[in-house]
Amino acid sequence: MQCCGIDVEKSTREFFEFQKKSIKGIEVLLDIEDRESDATPKELVYQEDKMKLYHYTPMVKKPCKVPTLIVYALVNRQYMMDIQKDRSVIKKLLELGLDVYIIDWGYPTPEDMYVTLDDYINDYINNAVDHIRKSKKADKINLIGVCQGGTFSTIYSSLYPQKIKNLVTMVTPIDFHVDDGLLFKWGKYLNIDNMIDAYGVLPGSIMNSGYLMLKPFQLMLDKYVDLFENIDDRETVENFVRMEKWIFDSPGQAGEALKQFVKDLYRDNKLVKGTMEIGNEKVDLKNIDMPLLNIYAEYDHLVAPKSSQALNNLVSSKDKELCSFSVGHIGMYVSSKSQIQIAPKLANWLIERSN
Amino acid sequence: MSAKTLENNFMSDYFDLQKKIINSWQGFCPTMETENSKKVKNDQLMESYQAFLKKSYDSFFNMLNPLSKGSSDNRFFNAMDTYQSVYRFWEDLVTKTAKKDLFNVDSFYNSWKDSYTNLFSADWIQNPLQFQELLKEPLEISQMLFNTQWNFFQPWIDDSEAFQKILEKSISGDKNAALDYIKLFRKDYEKTYGKFFDVPVLGMSRQHFEKQLQSMDSYLSYLNALNEFFATINKVGSETMETIVKEYQNMLENGTQPKTFKEFYEYWWKQNEEAYLNLFKTDDFSQLLGHVVDASVILKKNFDKYLEEQLDFLPFSKNSDMKSLYKTVYDLKKQVKSLNSKVDELIEKADIKGGSNSCSAAE
């Protein structure tokens, strides 16, 4: 039955359903459990300034002999890879036999405003790598870099190829001058000098505002309306709340490091051009000769697939693989595919090459 | 001109556009007057149906609203407010257009103008970069300081021939007129009054006065940039709404229009998302965004400097003192790390040497 172009029957059904959900939804909202993320057992093994290196308790009797270090981005927190028990990439990697370490960058405060990319790569990452090598008596380790952490890991592997057995990059920006991707476009026009002068450590909330603008109606309106549609489902609401907490748990960005990252990469694309310098050393991606697994997300709205794909043509590794999954940037770590396809692919690829 | 005024101007324009939608709606709404009996039946049905829907929504939001109190920064509740407002608008539109003979477009708009502004007041469109967080306090203080100065600029705007022409264009319905007006304003400002703030100042309070002028200049530059930003956002919103109207008319003719509020909402947000993403992809927008962000951080920098100067007599360390201290600590830390690593190397070398000596001795 239609009236003024409205399907009365369908609308009525929708509203009955809406009412039922509403009543149950109130109950759910008032009684949701805030189950903790970052719950897989681990031990703090090394600390330098705000950087902490954790070692996860292995979950198999004989874990892979070559230890694996995960380097996460400075933006957002590394526990996205251990968001909840039934969706933890870390837990899955441990179950599949990897011996996993992870860097937690912490929350920069004003005193960290002068920390540079040189500090992050030549000090923090290098010291973490050396600590693992020493404690495990291993010449080389496996390195997994995630997002901006992938860019750092790529740079690190080109500077210290002798310490890296296998390199895995995930949703990693490499070519910053690709046509796709709003962040790449906007980044070029930001006067980063003024931003850092004004703030010292750029607040995470400002970075988040930019990310929300990438899909304004979806991320600021429809996402919540969609939650409302499922508000009677406790598990959906709890998962949503956990993700929401993670999304807005955004550390500030150390000014000097961010300045170089924006100028050298977003503006000048120096990594691809081969003109980037860390400390006083040139970053030559041709130095990367170890096996490389480069994974990107086909529906990534933060790091355009083309930007990640570029890496395989810039390294000299003979054993290199480009691999994609039909997920988004975050879905790479929290979707069902992350458990069924992505983590197994990653673990098997590393184990095969760690003998 | 405050951010609130900008927002209200935006909503005024938005409402003018909505008027067009209603006119179109009236033209295309299925005629229910062919049979008197059918008309009565449909009207009654519609009334009871709307009453039912209203009850449904009210009952839920009455329950939800106490939860949202004290959660003013809660994104979920903000989104729900927006969703609820879109619904109220849709509900009223459908109800009133059903009574075609009694429907008055002007009174409908007047009754909705304020409420519709609230639709966009949930913190996602009036502050795409959440500038309120960035600049809340400086802006509030700046506004107090400079409100009286603002009148100074009014005659300049009124007397400008170019502005008059643009205004004429605007009256004749030129959609680009508002944006042109703002662009011209910014250009003229930078050429005239912007320079005024750079004029060297003499006398005992020279430095202090210069800082005040710099702060005023950056505040006005920021407002100009923000004005242009919102005019651009507004223009795309208007164009999208027109597109939606046209498409909706076609859909009504074909019988494929959204048949429930849920369908209407899905259609509405996806159209808007696409339109804004197309805007965001352009170089012009990227430059404009860069310009707004830059103007805001320059304002913050100048205002911070100004505040530091005002508070100089207090026995507290200032931000610039702390920055200097942070730099010293950073440099010292680097030095200590470097020395530590040299010490470690020396110890290692000494151990090796000691080890080989003892081996030699044993041999």
Image (spheres, helix red, strand yellow):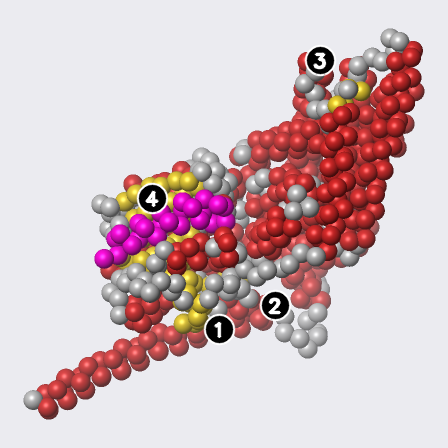
Task: Give the mark count.
Answer: 4
Around disc 3, counting alpha carbons within 10 Å, would you say few (fewer than 14), some (14 to 19), or many (20 or more)? few
Query: Which quadrant is the C terminus of chain B positioned in?
Result: bottom left
The residue where tag 2 is placed is B319
Judge if badges 3 and 2 mark residues of a common chain.
yes
Instruction: Identify residue type, mark 3.
Output: Glu
Label 3 SS: helix
The residue where tag 4 is placed is A311
Q: Which residues are magenta?
A: A332-355
Mark 4 touching mark 2, by CB under 8 A? Answer: no
Q: Chain of mark 1?
A: B
Instruction: Identify residue type, mark 4.
Output: Leu
* Residue A339 covered by magenta stretch: yes
Judge if badges 1 and 3 mark residues of a common chain.
yes
Q: Is residue A293 visible?
A: yes
Tell me which residue sits at (78%, 57%) in the image.
B70
Mark 2 or mark 1, which is nearer the start of the sequence? Answer: 2
Label 4 SS: helix
Q: Which mark is residue B95?
A: none
Instruction: Identify residue type, mark 1.
Output: Thr
For residue B304, which quarter of the picture?
bottom right
Tell me which residue sits at (67%, 66%) in the image.
B308
